[in-house]
Amino acid sequence: MELTTLLEIKNIETFYVLIYALRGVSLTIDEGTITAILGNNGAGKSTILKTVMGLLDDQPDKGTIEFMGKRIDGKDTEDIVKMGISYVPEGREVFEELTVRENLLMGAYRRHDRLGIKDDFRKIYNLFSVLENREGQLAGTLSGGEQQMLAIGRALMNRPKLLFLDEPSLGLSPILVKQIFGIIKAINKEGVTMLLVEQNARMALSISDLGLILENGRFVMKGKSKDLMLDKDVQEFYMGMKSEASAKGYQRWKRKKRWR
């Protein structure tokens, strides 16, 4: 079955002052899939999400971004959200002085379908039962894992066609990481397409369809996630399964696997 392209990024370049953050990045995301972008700190993973969301002034400097066949580069973030893209930022960024329920309502601020919002509350609480139990609690008093659930729930209240997740495992215990990724997979099965930025390569590849590895603002490798998980170099350099690796060996691997 032929997949429908939801997001297409073509040759974007993004700068911070005079420093290249993204160097000719291209990416296609198909409807109904989970795409994982892997890479070390500073590789430019989060910059891709922020560039698409219009969160960086006058960016991208070059290239185009299309969502559902329409150009969105240069649009305001609010307009991009209205089109159907939601973003869960790194560090969660919940409204700490608002309750759990008020945070979720913030995700539906542009909606006026009262019955639909009520139904979505039910769906969110089915996914994250702990949030229902904390409905009247201030978000700032939640645990890190609960705040991550709240941030995802808030994004879902926008009824997105495409959901961006930036480092959802950051700062969480292994048990919570497994729980969060299980929920991410369940959300995808409900029809939400996802772009996942993550340092935990093993977990990201285990739930995604396509994986890409970003180094210094460029993609150096791309493939089906199940294939990347079996790649010895990916295992060694991104999944912590190191043997006799050296810095020189790593550089040789990057040159060998360079993908553009």
Image: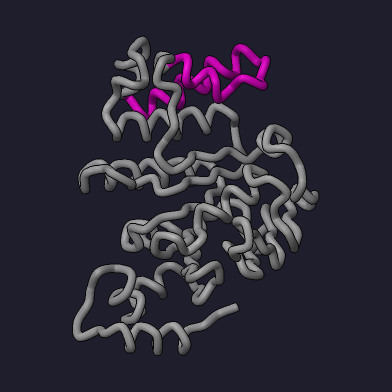
Most extreme residue toward the right is 70
Name the residue nearer the viewer: 32 or 130.
130
Relative vertical location of residue 177 with respect to residue 111 in this rendering, above or below: below
Name the residue rendered at 39%, 64% in the picture.
Answer: 40
Name the residue nearer the viewer: 136 or 40.
40
Residue 217 in which image quadrant: bottom right
Whether the magenta-drawn stretch holds residue 102 is answered as yes
Name the residue nearer the viewer: 139 or 8.
139
Q: Is residue 27 visible?
A: yes
Relative vertical location of residue 56 with respect to residue 23 in this rendering, above or below: above
Q: Which residues are magenta?
A: 101-129
- Could you tell me residue 101's position as x and y percent? 44, 15
- Could you tell me residue 44's position as x and y percent? 51, 60
Q: Which image quarter holds the N terminus? A: bottom right
Relative vertical location of residue 54 with respect to residue 28 in this rendering, above or below: above
In the displayed structure image, the side of residue 108 where residue 150 appears, left or right:
left
- Could you tell me residue 202's position as x and y percent? 32, 62
- Could you tell me residue 185's position as x and y percent? 41, 47
Residue 63 in which image quadrant: bottom right
In the displayed structure image, the side of residue 143 where residue 30 appears, left or right:
right
Name the residue rendered at 42%, 35% in the picture.
Answer: 92
Name the residue rendered at 73%, 59% in the picture.
Answer: 61
